[in-house]
Amino acid sequence: MSGWEYAPALESAGAAGLAESYGIFVGGEFGGGGGGPLHPLNPATEAPLAEVATADRSDVDSAVAAARASLRSVWGALPGAERAKYLFRLSRLVQERARELAAVETLDGGKPVQDSSGVQVPAAAAHLFHHAGWADKLDHAGFGADPRPLGVVAVVLSADHPLRRLASVVAPALAAGNAVVLKPSATTPLAALVFADLCRQAGLPAGAVNVLPGTGEVGAQLVAHGGVDAVAFAGSTGTGREVQKAAAGKRLAMELDGTGAHVVYDDAPLDQAVDGVVAGFSGSGGENCSRVLVQEPIAAEFLAKLRDRVRALRVGDPMDKNTDVGPLCSAERLARARELADSAQQAGATRWDHPGELPERGFFAAPAVFPDAQQAMRLAREPIPGPLLPVLTFRTPEEAVAKANNTPYGHTAAVWADKGSRALWTARQLQAGVVQVNTTHRSDPTAPPEPRQQSGFGRIAGLEAYLDV
Amino acid sequence: MLEPPPEFSDVVRDEASLRRFLHGLPGVDQVGLERRAAALGSRSLKRDAKWWAIDAAISMVDLTSLEGADSPGKVRALAAKAVRPDAERPDTPRVAAVCVYPDLAGVAAEALGGSGVGVASVATAFPSGRSSRQVKLAEVRLAVESGASEVDVVLDRGAFLAGSYGAVFEEVRAVREACGGAHLKVILETGELATADNVRRASWLALLAGADFIKTSTGKVSPAATLPVTVLMLQAVRHWRDRSGRLCGVKPAGGIRSTKDALKYLVAVREVAGPEWLTPGLFRFGASSLLGDLVMQRRTQRDGHYASAANVAVDA
C-alpha cells in the first residue's frame, strides 16, 4: 500500500485572468509607455506571460507630475478618515480578488500557489487593513502632533514577494498622505499592474498611485527625479548603493540583501526547528534566513531530521496545490544559485540534493543541504538566491553569535531554544532587523522590520519612513 | 516476553534512568506543531489519489462501539457492517477490526470468525484506568481468552502525571505479557496529558514497554484525536523505528467523523512517518460514524453524484 501518490491538483491558469498586454498606469489611467515592452516569463515553463509596456523618461515626468497634482488637488486635501476608506477598500478588494492575485503571483514569480494564496495575498490584505486604521490616527502614532506626509514617494521593488512587498510599502505611504510612483521589478511586474487595476476599481483619486513598469533604468530615473521627495527601495545591496547615490538629499528607506542565521540550541524543539528551517525553501529566497547554526551535541540528530524532511518536499509545478518548492523567479537567479552551490562543493562541502527529478523546463533548483559547510565558504557568507541550506555547528552561545553576526548583513535571524533566558540573550546579540524566537516567517504589519548594516535602513513597511518626522 | 531493544536496556533500568531519558527527548513547540499539522491538512487530494485514500481509510477503520447500552445484537450488527461496509458494492474493502468491551469480545469473535476482520477489545478499566493491577490484568486475560486478537488498554495517566514513569512502564510490560500473542494498543488519552511534551514522553514510554500501537484517546475525553497530536505520535513511531528498528503503529481515535478529516490523517502518515505506514498493520482509525461517511464518499467518487445517507447501513 505504499504506492500512494497525490494526483495533480492544479490551480487554473485562467484564474489569473491575465491580459495579453498591460500598459503603464499614470494619473488613474492605463496607457502605452514610451519604453520598449517587457515580456515577463512564467518561471515554471519559461513561456512569456504577457506584453508589458514600460516607461521612458517622459513617462517618469508625467507620473511624478500626476502624483504631485494629486497631492495639490484631491488626495492631498483629503482628511485621514477619507484616506482610510480607500485603504480599507483596497484591502477588501485584495481579499475579493484573492484567487486571481494568488494565481498571478504564482505564474509571474514561481511561488507555490499554496504560499501565494495562504501567505502572500492574505499578508498583502493585512498590510492595507492595518495601515488603513492609522490614516486618521497619525497624531497618536508617536511622532508628535500633526505629522506631515513627505510628498511624492518613489517605490522601487525587487522580484521577491511582489504583491506582499508592494502592499507593505504602499499602504503606510498612502496612510501617511503621500502619493506614490511605483516601479515594480522587470522580472515580476504583473502583481503591481493588477494592483493598479484594484486602485482604479476602488476609485482611488487619480495620481495617488502610479505604476511604471520597466528595467533598472526607469528605476534610476525615478529615484533621481527632482520631483520625488522620498524613496523606498527593496532590492540588492549593490543596486541599493546606486540608489543611495542617485537619491542623495531625499528621504530614503531600504530593504536589501541578507543572509540570516537560524541559531539552533541543544534544547531546541528540534522537529519545529527543522520545519522552520525548511519553510524558507518555499519562499523565493533572499529575505529568508538562509544559514543554520546548530549546537554540536544535537547536530547529528538535527541533520538526520532535516534530511528526512527535505526528502519529503514536493518540488515542481507551482500551480499544483501540493507543491512545496517551485522554481526561482529568473534564469539569472538560478545561475547564481548554481554557481554558489558549485563554489561550496569546490571548497569541499558535502551536498545532499533533494532526490526528486526536476521539470525539464523552468528555473528549478533542487533543494540542497550542505551538512558540513564552513564559515569560510562563500555559501555561508553571501545572500543565497535559492533553496540551498548551509549547516554549520557551534559549541557555545558566544560562538553562535559570533558566527551569526559574521556577515556584512543584518536582515533576519531566528533562535530556537527552550530556555527563555538564553533565547532572549541571543536575540539581543544578533545583528538583525527581525529576530524570531522558535518560529519563522511570521509577516506582521504591526512590526515592520528595520534592517541593519548592509541589509538596509529605515522601515520601508512602517509609517515613519513616509512622515516628515 | 518482548524485551526492549538492547540499546535501550540502560534507559529502562530504573525510574531515574527512564525519567532522564524521557525528559531528554527534544521539546515540542505547540505553535509550530499546529502549523505543521495545518500545512499537512491543506494538501489537495484529487481523483486517483482520493479513490485510493478512501479505500485505504476504510481498510484501516477499527469499527467501534463502547457504550453501556452495547448488547450482543448491537455487536453482531457492527460485525456485519465491518465485513461488508457497503452491501451493494462488494468490492468495498472490509475494515481492520471491530472494537468492543471485553465482555462482548466473544460475541464479536463468533460473528467475525474467518472473515479476516480482527477483534479488538478494550481493557484495563477502560476508559479511566483506575483500578488495581490485578483487575486490569484479569480484564486483559478475559479479552484474549474471549477471542480478541487486539487489546486496547489505557495508560495510567494518574501515575504518568505524578511522574511515576517506572510504575507506568511496569504496568504496560505486565499487560504486554498478559496479551500473549494479541496485538497491544496503548491509549495515551492525550486530552488528559494536555501538553505536547507529555504526549511525546508517553509515546516513548509505551513504545519502550512493548506497545505495538500507540493510540490517542478513549473517545470519552475531549479533546480526543487531533491532527497535531497524531503528527507528534507519528514522529515518535518514526524515530522509534530509526533507533530501534521496530515498526509500531498509530491509532487516532475519537472525533474523526468525515472522509475529509480522515484523508488529512493519511497525508500526515505519508509525510511524517513515511509511506510504509500506510497499511492497517501500522495505522488505524478508531471510529464509529466515520465508516458511513467513507462509504458514502466512495459511492460519490464512483457514481459521479452524491449518495444519500439512506443508502448506507446505519450504525445503531
Image: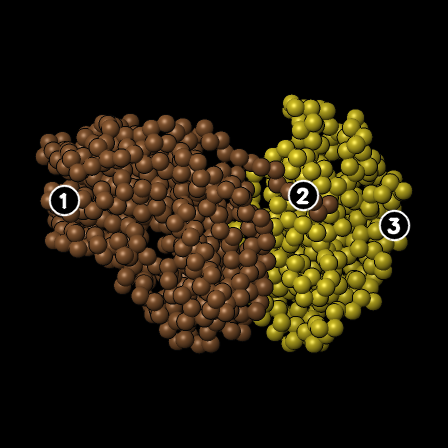
Chain colours: A brown, B yellow
Dots 2 and 3 on the same chain: no
Amino acid carrying mark 3 in the image: Gly
Given residues A273 and A318, the one toward you in this image is A318
Mark number, residue A239? none
- Write the residue at 85% across / 60% down: B180
Mark 1 surroundings within 10 Å by alpha-carbon count, few (fewer than 14), some (14 through 19), many (20 or more)? some
Chain under numbered label 1: A
Label 2 residue SS: loop
| Residue named by callout 1 | A225
Label 3 residue SS: loop
Q: Quadrant of the N terminus of chain A?
A: top right
Mark 2 surroundings within 10 Å by alpha-carbon count, few (fewer than 14), some (14 through 19), many (20 or more)? some
Mark 3 surroundings within 10 Å by alpha-carbon count, few (fewer than 14), some (14 through 19), many (20 or more)? many
Amino acid carrying mark 2 in the image: Trp
Compared to B67, does A49 lie above or below? above
A239 sits to left or right of A14: left
Residue A382 in view (yes/no): yes
Mark number, residue A4? 2
Chain under numbered label 2: A
State how far apart marks 2 and 3 are (Cα): 34 Å
| Residue named by callout 3 | B147
B152 sits to left or right of A103: right
Dots 3 and 1 on the same chain: no
Decide which of tag 2 and tag 1 comes sooner along the chain.
Answer: 2
Compared to A32, does A405 lie above or below? below
Amino acid carrying mark 1 in the image: His
Residue B216 appears at what percent x and percent y?
65, 52
Count of number-bearing discs: 3
The image quarter in which residue A165 lies: top left
